[in-house]
């Protein structure tokens, strides 16, 4: 993250001062000149230049105006350096930034954070800044000091960055972790304050001493400005702050990442964002709530379901045992007729039940079959010890001894895949990849409708799967394009039938225009209606808002 963290202090003698500063130095991108023998990242000459700038700032006329409270590290101190091995970023800490232009930016942020830009009570977070001098997240706080005016000194921790949106989005993260650092400093200083007050109470001493405005700052044991190290009695204070600030810069930079999207986000992306938002809201509601074990278990299962699309592949790669690797692999194991029957039920929105003793194999089958559907149409229970109704899940994995209710097994909207083991002590050992030699698959369904005509998406997919010249990755991209094509048709049909409320005759004309009529028309229409349930809430609300705006616009233009 291109930001800088600084600890600032309001000195009673010299006003706002920067005490300690940590900045991140990114390694320069390789160039022909650097490869030919120019300076490389980590070159000692570059480090010495940076140290020289800092030393010049510390040894200038400003250094003469510093008192003990304004100084953190002596001018001869080399500062602190930490290197991130993963990214090559160096985190440098000293009293002032290494670059002169940053010195003025941090100086201005320090002055504003300890003078005019403060929240009510003078203690707490605040945000300010502009495009020219950068944006600042500032958190002011007090440190107890038995010799200070009012028995406390004023400090602030500021983070300066040029990216306003990034800094605002990081507000909760920064506030949470800066509070930990501030509370640690305050609690340590409070112990020192209590010990000093126990030895010599300063309130009574001040009440009995003669008051003189001219010498008041020097009446307190001749030390009007005490260093933060003296206030906390922490021998490694600055090294500790360097570690804390370096971690904060690294964690804040890796917390939010930019992702390049080519064109508008897909429906799958919108649905995943909505599910993530709902999960975070649900987790925040559950935090601090007192619930039984059953509620906690229920919450965890829903959380796991929300992340099935993001974590299934990683989990399956780590688990041992035979697994389905792709749609083509599944088709080879089941056979072309059984695969078409199973894929047809998936595309039509029927409940697909796999029953067997190998949960990893069942989960791998679901991962492969889920690629046929939009994310919003998938509700999965990978493995369960009891039957779950179709409205809860359209992919259900069951233990081998779990019975399927009679009304479910006799329904045409359900397909059951029973897995039986073929391995025995008389069969020689076979490879785990050879699923056909290990298991037998029996597919049963009460559906009597012909499935050889459509839908058109399945027909095109099977053509791609049969073409051995196409690799698995090419078939996956082909399926992605087919899904996007049919999702666009779903959007048109949703807008025409649900939003505009057109009649059946007009809807039939739109279906013909979309190419959903002809052979397999019934399956095409059924697929389109089922996939409407997978549209994101964002798209639906945007569509309704646009329609309402379009209804008002003719009235407003007529009145004008």
Image (spheres, rainbow, N blue to C red):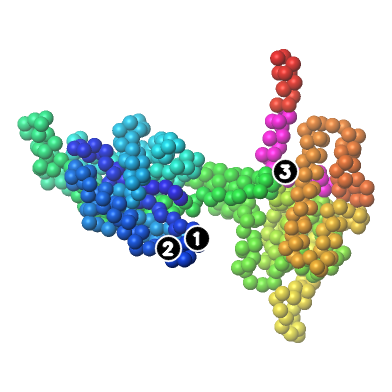
- Badge 3 marks a residue whose secondary structure is loop
Residue at image x 50%, y 60%?
A: 31
Residue 547 inside the magenta-drawn segment? yes
Q: Residues within 10 Å of mark 1 (few under 14, many from 20)?
A: few
> Residue 246, percent across and down?
38, 54
Q: Is residue 230 above or below residue 111?
A: below
**What residue did someone put label 3 on?**
535
> Residue 51, percent across and down?
30, 56
Q: Are marks 2 and 3 in contact (CB under 8 Å)?
A: no
The image quadrant of residue 417 is: bottom right
Instruction: Name the disc covering residue 38, or none.
Output: 2
Instruction: Name the disc covering residue 31, or none.
Output: 1
Residue at image x 77%, y 46%?
A: 487
Q: Are marks 2 and 1 in contact (CB under 8 Å)?
A: yes
The disc, 3 or 1, on the residue closer to the chain's N-terminal end is 1
| CA distance separating discs 2 and 3 | 55 Å
As rendered, which of 560 and 234 lies closer to the eye? 560
| CA distance separating discs 2 and 1 | 9 Å
Q: Identify the magenta region.
A: 526-548
As rendered, which of 535 and 306 lies closer to the eye? 535
Helix, strand or loop: magenta stretch: helix
Q: Nearer the viewer, mark 2 or mark 3?
A: 2
As rendered, which of 40 and 203 lies closer to the eye? 40
| CA distance separating discs 3 and 1 | 47 Å
Q: Residues within 10 Å of mark 3 (few under 14, many from 20)?
A: many
> Residue 26, percent across and down?
44, 55
- Badge 1 marks a residue whose secondary structure is loop
């Amino acid at each position: 993250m291109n930001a800088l963290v600084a600890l600032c202090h309001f000195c009673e003698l010299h006003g706002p001062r920067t005490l300690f500063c940590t900045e991140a130095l990114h390694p320069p991108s390789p160039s022909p000149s650097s490869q030919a023998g120019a300076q490389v990242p980590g070159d000692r000459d570059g480090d010495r230049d940076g140290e020289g700038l800092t030393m010049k700032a510390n040894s200038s006329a400003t250094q003469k105006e510093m008192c003990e409270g304004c100084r953190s590290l002596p001018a001869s101190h080399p500062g602190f350096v930490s290197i991130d091995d993963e990214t090559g970023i160096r985190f440098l800490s000293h009293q002032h930034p290494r670059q002169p232009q940053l010195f003025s930016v941090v100086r201005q942020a320090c002055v504003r954070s300890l003078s005019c830009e403060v929240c009510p009570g003078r203690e707490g977070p605040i945000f300010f800044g502009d495009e020219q001098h950068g944006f600042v997240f500032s958190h002011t706080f007090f440190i107890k000091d038995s010799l200070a005016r009012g028995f406390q000194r004023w400090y602030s921790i500021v983070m300066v960055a040029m990216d306003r949106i990034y800094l605002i989005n990081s507000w909760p993260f920064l506030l949470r972790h800066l509070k930990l650092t501030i509370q640690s400093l305050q609690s340590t200083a409070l112990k020192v304050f209590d010990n000093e007050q126990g030895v010599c109470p300063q309130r009574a001493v001040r009440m009995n001493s003669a008051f003189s405005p001219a010498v008041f700052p020097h009446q307190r044991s001749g030390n009007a400005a005490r260093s933060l190290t003296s206030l906390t009695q922490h021998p490694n204070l600055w090294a500790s702050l360097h570690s804390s600030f370096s971690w904060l810069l690294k964690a804040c930079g890796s917390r939010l990442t930019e992702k390049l999207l080519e064109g508008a986000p897909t429906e799958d992306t919108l649905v995943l964002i909505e599910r993530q938002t709902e999960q975070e809201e649900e987790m925040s509601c559950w935090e601090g709530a007192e619930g039984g074990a059953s509620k906690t278990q229920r919450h965890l299962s829903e959380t796991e379901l929300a992340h099935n699309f993001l974590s299934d592949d990683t989990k399956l790669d780590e688990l041992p045992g035979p697994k389905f690797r792709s749609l083509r692999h599944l088709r080879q194991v089941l056979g072309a007729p059984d695969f078409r029957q199973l894929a047809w039920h998936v595309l039509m929105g029927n409940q697909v039940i796999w029953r067997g003793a190998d949960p990893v194999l069942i989960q791998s089958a679901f991962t492969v079959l889920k690629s046929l559907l939009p994310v919003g149409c998938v509700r999965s229970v990978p493995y369960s010890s009891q039957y779950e109704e179709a409205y809860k899940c359209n992919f259900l994995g069951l233990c081998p001894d779990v019975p399927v209710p009679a009304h479910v097994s006799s329904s045409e909207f359900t397909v059951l895949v029973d897995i039986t083991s073929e391995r025995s002590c008389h069969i020689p050992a076979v490879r785990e990849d050879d699923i056909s030699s290990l298991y037998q698959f029996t597919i049963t369904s009460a559906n009597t409708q012909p499935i050889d005509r459509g839908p058109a998406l399945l027909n095109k997919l099977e053509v791609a799967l049969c073409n051995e010249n196409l690799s698995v990755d090419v078939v996956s991209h082909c399926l992605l394009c087919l899904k996007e094509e049919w999702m666009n048709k779903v959007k048109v049909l949703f807008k025409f039938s649900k939003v505009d409320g057109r009649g059946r005759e007009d809807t039939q004309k739109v279906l013909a225009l979309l190419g959903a009529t002809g052979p397999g028309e019934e399956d095409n229409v059924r697929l389109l209606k089922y996939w409407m349930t997978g549209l994101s809430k964002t798209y639906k609300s945007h569509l309704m808002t646009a329609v309402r705006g379009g209804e008002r616009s003719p009235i407003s233009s007529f009145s004008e």
